[in-house]
Amino acid sequence: LQESESENKLDGETASDSESKSDFGGSSPVPTSDDTPEVLNRALSNLSSRWKNWWVRGILTLAMITFFFIIIYLGPMVLMTIVMCVQIKCFHEIITIGYNVYHSYDLPWFRTLSWYFLLCVNYFFYGETVTDYFFTLVQREEPLRILSKYHRFISFALYLTGFCMFVLSLVKKHYRLQFYMFGWTHVTLLIVVTQSHLIIHNLFEGMIWFIVPISCVICNDIMAYMFGFFFGRTPLIKLSPKKTWEGFIGGFFSTVLFGLLLSYVMSGYRCFTCPVEFNNDTNSFTVDCEPSELFQLHEYNIPVVLQSVVGWKTVRMYPFQIHSIALSTFASLIGPFGGFFASGFKRAFKIKDFANTIPGHGGIMDRFDCQYLMATFVNVYIASFIRGPNPSKLIQQFLTLRPDQQLHIFNTLKAHLVDRGILGSLEDA
Amino acid sequence: EVDLEERLRELDLRSDSDVPDIPPPTDSTPEILKRALSGLSARWKNWWIRGILSLAMISGFFLIIYLGSFMLMLLVLSIQVKCYHEIITIGYRVYHSYDLPWFRSLSWYFLLCVNYFFYGETVADYFATFVQRREQLQFLIRYHRFISFALYLTGFCMFVLSLVKKHYRLQFYMFAWTHVTLLITVTQSHLVIQNLFEGMIWFLVPISSVICNDITAYIFGFFFGRTPLIKLSPKKTWEGFIGGFFSTVVFGFIFSYFLAQHQYFVCPVEYNSETNRFVTECEPSELFQMEKYSVPPLLQAVLGWETVNMYPFQMHSFALSTFASLIGPFGGFFASGFKRAFKIKDFADTIPGHGGIMDRFDCQYLMATFVHVYITSFIRGPNPSKLLKQLLILQPEQQLSVYKTLKSHLVEKGILQPSLRG
């Protein structure tokens, strides 16, 4: 009996929503520690608490947006590094919540194992996607080449080591706790790491595919908040009582408009529309290319319905702007579901915010919850409708085939090209 | 009143009885067996039932191999669905979540979406010619990522909309449980099918090695077992572990020797659009052609031979059976830990004497992933037909530049004679 009682104490998890009484002191959430810098505190000391909060949020929002612009200016390498840091911080935040829920600070090995798994999965994904872009750099350095070529095997072996350590670390009284934490870690990895790699993938396609989606989500957040603030009456969903239909719809239209304008401005610049490439000679990233069709102005006929409204017969637009409508629509209609999911999660585990990293806003996860669905959507969208396969990757794969297979493919390709008239009876070497 | 109800529920869930007591095992042993064995003591009776069912499963396995690759694929899929069902049912019991709105439908719906996604990624390539002829299939395969993602999102939104005030945590747990189960069962089953398409031998040897290790470790443990191996599974012993290791390696060697001789097992499975069937016919690759190996001097004295004729594949089988005996059991320990954590004796009662399907397949999962990673890292290059398909999708300018690169490479390697050919 004693044993089962102590197991119950450690096995802090239950499925009941009312379990939290002992953890978090009744139904009120943990009072958030006030992170606001002293400067701001003094400057705003005269205002009432509501306006003070509004100002803090506003200032931090501007600070984050400015920071965003700065890192865009600094280039793809810095962006990649920032994405990685955000990923690690999000992972840390969610794992910490798991620890709090399960009181599992004392579990042997668990912190180490979680970070170890994070490392393995990141290594696996790097091998799968990013090394293609650094291909020539990797080929030159022998250790890198082996790490890249056999990345699947090595990352799997590393993962297995972690798996076996987990099995060996199972302690009699804490089985269930340990399995829960194991499951928690894996779901978090699935959410956080895959999405961050999809974002980096999108980035390499062209910075515009990174900037427009993220900006649309941010814009939708801000616009929906404003519309809700000024016009909000009808509640949208029980999960988030502050959201309103007016905010939702207003945010939708503003975001689509914003997306159209932003893409118009960005499509004019090569540094945003060209795929990111790694230049071996200068050992840095370059964005220089002939802009693809998507980023060349076209004349479009305005449908008759809109002609009377807008007064023009044709309009010059970039084809990319049509795609931006799809992206901003997704950001406004489906993106919020990521936010509702995170709200439900916070209510389920009785936390107010994921963490206290950003004053007035909560943790990093609080800012990025809508972004995750967006990143996957953009990646799927690009893979399905925009981008074909990557030619250099295909060449790499070709080079590993057997000679007879290579010859067969070469001849088929040749026949195809001759067929299409792309290749005449040219006899160049 | 609500407070009282919540407190009572909280108490109920806090105690160990939140998981229902191990239900008395429903005895699904067929009547025939029971009558035949009625004379024996309980221990021997159990042994006989297990033995008979093992033989039955192995015979069933041989039968399906004989029936061909397509039947094997169907078998793998049915096992996947059954394993998924078993694990989800355990989740339901642990969380009393039979009454959660939508949950059953959502779990099966997600299973469907993820399967569709994986089919589009892997299997569709093999059926390329079949798919080309039918318009609707073409559309479904070409845009499978987008469609499966859209379907998944619909399920995700349904989940968010179905969140009910008092059951938030329960619902999130079930959501996570479903996803982890999908990760385990669906990805592994697709890896198994991919291994199968590489050649039936890559499917048979690993699975047989795991089964052999199970059986020989049990037998060695039964006769010689003294030192316990791990606290999680008190019945496992070091003697069983080591004995099983050596027997499995030897078994793997011998078994691959026999299989490597038949084209049926060795050739990649291909879909023939004319006959609408799977064919396994090819020129056996280097792996499956006899080679002379010099026996290392150490073993020469033992064996008395200087050289030996072996298939290169047998060296690979050595790696496969080593993995099956040393790391495979960790999958079994993981499942044992899982069963103890959730206080269940078996995953289900599908197979008399053995438990559920998951009980038989817990060691196989790690094996399937290992074989797949092994093949892609060391054996197989990329799939030529998939490569060709991707080349044909490229833009004309890209195709031209690729063509030029390839040509210069082939000329350099002397595979293609330069210039004068048309």
Image: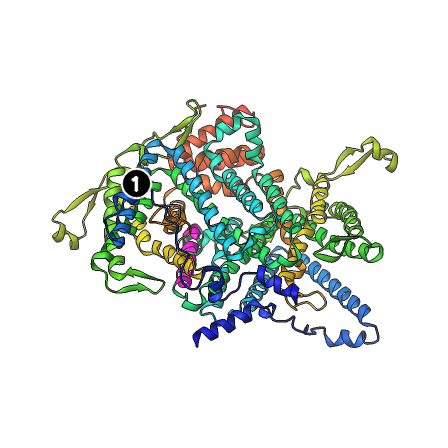
Residue A190 in the figure: left or right of residue A153? left
Does residue B120 sit above or below A395 in this rendering?
Answer: below
Provide the major secondary structure of the magenta segment. helix
Nearer to us in this view, B285 or B149: B149
* Location of residue A298 in the rendering, given as x and y in whole percent from the top left corner: 23, 40
- The part of the chain drawn in magenta is B142-160
Residue B190 in the figure: left or right of residue A347? right
* Location of residue A406 in the rendering, given as x and y in whole percent from the top left corner: 54, 34
Residue B257 location, quadrant = top right
Kindly identify which residue carries mark 1.
A39
Q: Chain of mark 1?
A: A
Image quadrant occupied by the N terminus of chain A: bottom right
Asked if the stretch drawn in magenta spans residue B127, the answer is no
Tell me the residue at 46%/28% (across/down): B405
Residue A299 location, quadrant = top left
Nearer to us in this view, A129 or A93: A93
Task: Let me know if residue A6 appears in the view.
Answer: yes
Badge 1: residue crowd in 10 Å (few <14, some 14–19, many ≥20): few
Tell me the residue at 57%/38% (across/down): B381
Residue A370 in the figure: left or right of residue A316? right
Task: Let me know if residue B200 appears in the view.
Answer: no
Does residue B421 sit above or below B260 in this rendering?
Answer: above
* Location of residue A377 in the rendering, given as x and y in whole percent from the top left corner: 38, 50
- The structure's colour scheme is rainbow
